[in-house]
C-alpha cells in the first residue's frame, strides 16, 4: 500500500468502541437493515451488501435510515422483536470481519419528505387520506416543527407535529436503541441534525416557528435531539455510543434556494457561529461522534454532491468545527482517500465518510490496500439509480414507485442491492458474440458475456472505445467520467476472450460470423427544421472539440446536456445563454434534484441568462431569433449557437439476421438504462 494512505488504516475510538480504520461507510437511503418503503423487517439484501463490504476492509458501517415508525403500515420499529432476533447473528458475522456497525434511526423527514404527485393528491384530499392511512399516513410522514411549505410541492403545506408525537418519538428511540444494543450492534446514529430532515428543521430558525419549549431560543430549538440522546443513554447506559448525523452549515438563502460554492449570501439556516456553539452543546448532551457534512434539501447538492461540486467540498467546514469538540468527527462529501488520509494525519478530522463509491465498487478499499487503484470502478456522482428523486417546476417528485422503493442501487453495477435479479451465471454453451458499437452499452455487454464464458468481438467504427460517452465526459468537471472510460478499457483487456476491432464500421450484418449479434450503435442528434439550422453547432461536435465557439454562446435546449454545456462555457470564461421550450430547466425524469438544483442555482447566482418557454425561430449570422412565451419574437445576439435538443435511436437494421439491441440504439436513456439493459441482454446470450 502506498504510504500516503497509511493514516486511513490506524485505529480510533468512538466512546469505548475501537474502530480498526478511519474509513466510514456512510448511510444511504435504501440500505436500511430494516427495509425501506415496505413493512419493517430484517432486510437480507442490505445485510448481504454490508457483509461483503465488511469483508473488504471497511472500518465502520452505518446503514441507511431506519424510520423510527414504519413508513408503510405505521408500526413502531421497536415492536418488531423478530427483526432484532435476526439482526443478532448478522452482527456476529460482521464482527468476524473486524468491522463495526452502527444503526442509523430517523425521527422523520418533515417537509423534506419526497412526495410524488400521487401523494400530493392524497395529502390534499381528506377522504383519500383517511382511506390510505392504514397503509401510509401522509400527514404523519411530512409533519414538521411548524406549518411549512413542502420542499417538493408548492401545493403541499406540512402540518405542525404535536408534543405527544415528539414524546412518542423520543421514547421509541430509547426502546429501539436498547434492542439494537442487545442484538450486538456497536452503536446507533441519530438521524439527523442534518440535511434539513425533521430534527434539523427543529434546530433551524427558518423552519422552527414554535412557541412552546421546542421553539424560540437556541436551547429550545436543539431540545429534541438533546432529549433523544439523553433517553438513549438512560436506556442503554453512558458507554453505548451514539453518533449524530450533522450539517455544519445549512448553505440556504431561502426556501428551495441554496448557495453554491463561492457565492456571497446571507445564511438563513445554521451559520458557522451557531455551529460552533451547537457542536459543543450536542457533545455535552451525550453524543459520542459527529458524522458531518453540509446542506439541507434546500441546498441538497452539499449533502449529495454531484460532479459539479468540488472534490472534498465539505472538508474545510467540518475541519473547522472539529476544533470545538473533544469527540471524533467524520467528514463526508466527495472525499478522496489521499486528501482524507492527510486530514486524518493532521488531526483535522477523525474519520473519512464515503458512501456511493461503495455502490459502484464494494471492493475499493481492498484494491486501494493492494495498490490496484486503476481497478476501482469510479462513482461518477450521477445519482441515476441511487437517489434519482427528480423535481422541476409543476412536478413534485417525478419518480416511479419502483424507484422510490429501490433507491441505493447503482447505475454502473446493477448487481448492487439487486443480487437476486442481476448475476453472472456461466453459459451452458459458449457462443461467438458480435457487438456492433464500442460505447458503454457495447463494452458492458461484452464484459457480461465474457464473464459468462462467451467469445466476444466488438466492432467499433471510430478509433477509440467509449462512443458518445467520450463527448459526455469531456467537460472539465467530468474527471470521474473520463476515469470510467479508462476503467472500461482496462477491464476489457483482462479478458482474452474479448477482441476489439477499432476503425471497423459495420453496415451489413450478414457479413458477421457470429452466433449472436448485439446492436449497440447508440443514438444520433435530433435536428430542428428551422431557417439557418446549418449555422448551428451540434452539442457533440462542441464537446469533442471539433467545433470552436466564440465568447457569446446561445445554447438551444435546457436539458441536462445543454445545461452542462452552459456550465462548462461559464467555467471557461465565456457568456452562455440558454433557450428552453419547457417551463423549467432539466424538466425530465431520472435526474436527481441534487444535480439539477445545483445547475439552476448556479445559473441564477451567476446571472446566466435563461429563457424558458421560448422557441427557436431562426439561427442568424449574429445570433438567434426566438419566440417568447408571450408569443412575441425577439433576437438574442451571439457569436455561436449550440444545438442540444436531444437524441433519437440509431439502430443498425438486422438484414434478416436476429440481433439484440442495447442502450440508446433501442431507446434513448441515461447511463443507468444503458448499463442495466446491457446486463438484461448479456445474461440471456
Image (cartoon, rainbow, N blue to C red):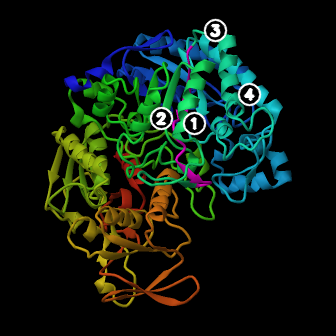
Looking at the image, residue 321 sits to the left or right of residue 364; the answer is right
Q: Which of label 2 and label 1 is nearer to you?
A: 1
Instruction: Name the residue: 54% across, 37% down.
Output: 273
Q: Which of label 1 and label 3 is nearer to you?
A: 1
Disc assigned to residue 169 = 4
| Residue 415 seen in render | no
- Earlier-in-chain disc, 1 versus 3: 3
| Disc 3, SS | loop
The span from disc 1 to disc 4 (Cα, nearest Å) is 26 Å
- Earlier-in-chain disc, 2 versus 1: 1
- Reading the image, the residue beneath label 1 is 274
The span from disc 4 to disc 3 (Cα, nearest Å) is 19 Å
Give residue 386's position: percent from left, percent from top: 48, 43
- Reading the image, the residue beneath label 2 is 417
Instruction: Name the residue: 47% across, 31% down.
Output: 321
User: Contact, CB < 8 Å: mark 2 with mark 1?
Assistant: no
| Disc 2, SS | loop
| Disc 4, SS | helix
- Earlier-in-chain disc, 2 versus 4: 4
Is residue 641 shown above or below 459? below
Q: Which of label 4 and label 3 is nearer to you?
A: 3
Give residue 573's position: percent from left, percent from top: 30, 66
The span from disc 2 to disc 3 (Cα, nearest Å) is 34 Å
User: Contact, CB < 8 Å: mark 2 with mark 3?
Assistant: no
- Earlier-in-chain disc, 1 versus 4: 4
Mark 4 Cα-neighbour bin, 10 Å: few <14, some 14–19, many ≥20:
many
- Reading the image, the residue beneath label 3 is 237
Amino acid at each position: 500500500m502506498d504510504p500516503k494512505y497509511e493514516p486511513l488504516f490506524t485505529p480510533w475510538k468512538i466512546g469505548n468502541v475501537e474502530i480498526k480504520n478511519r474509513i466510514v461507510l456512510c448511510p444511504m437511503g435504501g440500505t436500511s437493515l430494516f427495509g425501506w418503503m415496505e413493512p419493517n423487517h430484517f432486510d437480507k439484501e442490505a445485510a448481504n451488501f454490508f457483509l461483503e463490504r465488511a469483508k473488504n476492509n471497511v472500518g465502520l458501517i452505518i446503514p441507511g435510515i431506519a424510520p423510527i415508525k414504519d413508513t408503510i403500515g405505521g408500526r413502531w420499529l421497536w415492536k418488531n422483536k423478530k427483526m432484532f432476533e435476526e439482526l443478532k447473528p448478522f452482527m456476529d458475522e460482521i464482527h468476524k470481519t473486524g468491522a463495526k456497525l452502527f444503526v442509523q434511526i430517523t425521527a422523520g423527514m418533515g417537509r423534506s419528505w419526497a412526495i410524488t404527485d400521487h401523494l400530493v393528491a392524497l395529502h390534499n384530499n381528506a377522504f383519500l387520506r383517511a382511506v390510505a392511512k392504514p397503509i401510509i399516513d401522509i400527514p404523519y410522514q411530512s409533519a414538521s416543527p411548524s406549518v411549512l411549505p413542502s420542499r417538493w410541492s408548492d401545493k403541499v403545506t406540512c402540518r405542525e407535529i404535536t408534543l405527544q408525537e415528539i414524546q412518542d418519538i423520543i421514547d421509541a428511540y430509547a426502546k429501539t436503541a436498547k434492542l439494537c444494543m442487545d442484538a450486538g450492534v456497536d452503536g446507533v446514529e441519530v438521524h439527523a441534525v442534518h440535511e434539513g430532515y425533521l430534527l434539523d428543521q427543529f434546530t433551524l430558525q427558518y423552519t422552527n416557528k414554535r412557541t412552546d419549549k421546542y421553539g424560540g431560543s437556541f436551547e429550545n430549538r436543539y431540545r429534541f435531539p438533546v432529549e433523544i440522546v439523553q433517553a438513549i443513554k438512560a436506556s442503554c447506559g453512558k458507554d453505548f455510543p451514539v453518533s449524530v448525523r450533522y450539517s455544519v452549515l445549512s448553505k440556504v438563502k431561502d426556501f428551495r434556494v441554496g448557495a453554491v460554492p463561492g457565492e456571497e449570501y446571507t445564511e438563513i439556516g445554521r451559520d458557522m457561529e451557531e455551529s460552533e456553539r451547537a457542536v459543543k452543546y450536542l457533545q455535552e448532551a451525550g453524543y459520542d461522534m459527529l458524522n458531518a457534512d453540509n446542506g439541507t434539501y434546500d441546498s441538497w447538492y452539499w449533502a449529495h454532491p454531484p460532479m459539479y461540486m468540488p472534490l472534498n467540498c465539505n472538508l474545510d467546514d467540518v475541519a473547522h468545527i472539529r476544533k470545538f469538540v473533544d469527540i471524533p468527527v467524520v467528514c463526508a462529501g466527495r472525499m478522496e482517500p489521499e486528501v482524507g488520509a492527510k486530514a486524518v494525519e493532521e488531526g483535522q478530522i477523525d474519520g473519512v465518510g464515503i458512501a456511493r463509491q461503495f455502490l459502484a465498487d464494494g471492493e475499493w478499499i481492498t484494491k486501494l490496500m493492494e495498490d490496484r487503484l486503476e481497478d476501482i470502478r469510479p462513482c461518477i456522482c450521477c445519482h441515476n439509480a441511487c437517489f434519482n428523486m427528480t423535481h422541476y417546476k409543476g412536478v413534485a417528485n417525478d419518480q416511479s414507485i419502483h424507484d422510490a422503493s429501490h433507491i441505493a442501487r447503482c447505475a454502473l453495477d446493477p448487481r448492487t442491492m439487486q443480487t437476486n435479479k442481476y448475476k453472472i451465471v456461466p453459459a451452458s454453451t459458449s457462443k461467438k458474440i458480435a457487438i456492433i458499437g464500442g460505447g458503454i452499452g457495447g463494452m458492458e455487454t461484452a464484459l457480461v458475456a465474457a464473464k459468462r464464458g462467451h467469445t466476444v468481438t466488438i466492432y467499433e467504427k471510430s478509433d477509440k472505445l467509449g462512443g458518445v460517452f467520450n463527448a459526455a465526459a469531456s467537460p472539465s468537471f467530468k474527471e470521474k467520467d473520463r476515469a470510467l472510460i479508462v476503467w472500461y478499457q482496462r477491464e476489457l483487456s483482462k479478458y482474452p476472450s474479448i477482441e476489439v476491432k477499432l476503425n471497423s464500421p459495420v453496415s451489413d450484418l450478414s457479413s458477421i460470423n457470429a452466433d449472436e449479434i448485439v446492436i449497440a450503435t447508440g443514438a444520433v442528434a435530433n435536428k430542428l427544421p428551422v431557417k439557418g439550422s446549418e449555422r448551428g453547432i451540434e452539442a457533440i461536435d462542441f464537446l469533442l472539440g471539433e467545433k470552436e465557439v466564440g465568447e457569446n454562446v446561445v445554447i438551444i435546449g435546457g436539458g441536462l446536456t445543454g445545461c452542462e454545456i452552459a456550465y462548462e462555457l461559464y467555467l471557461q470564461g465565456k457568456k452562455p445563454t440558454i433557450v428552453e421550450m419547457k417551463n423549467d430547466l432539466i424538466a425530465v425524469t431520472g435526474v436527481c434534484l441534487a444535480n439539477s438544483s445545483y445547475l439552476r442555482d448556479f445559473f441564477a447566482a451567476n446571472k446566466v441568462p435563461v429563457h424558458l418557454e421560448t422557441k427557436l425561430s431562426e439561427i442568424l449570422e449574429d445570433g438567434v431569433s426566438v419566440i417568447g412565451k408571450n408569443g412575441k419574437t425577439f433576437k438574442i445576439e451571439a457569436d455561436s449557437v449550440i444545438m442540444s435538443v436531444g437524441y433519437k435511436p440509431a439502430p443498425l437494421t438486422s438484414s434478416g439476421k436476429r440481433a439484440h439491441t442495447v442502450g440508446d440504439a433501442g431507446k434513448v436513456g441515461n447511463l443507468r438504462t444503458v448499463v442495466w439493459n446491457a446486463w438484461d441482454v448479456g445474461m440471456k446470450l
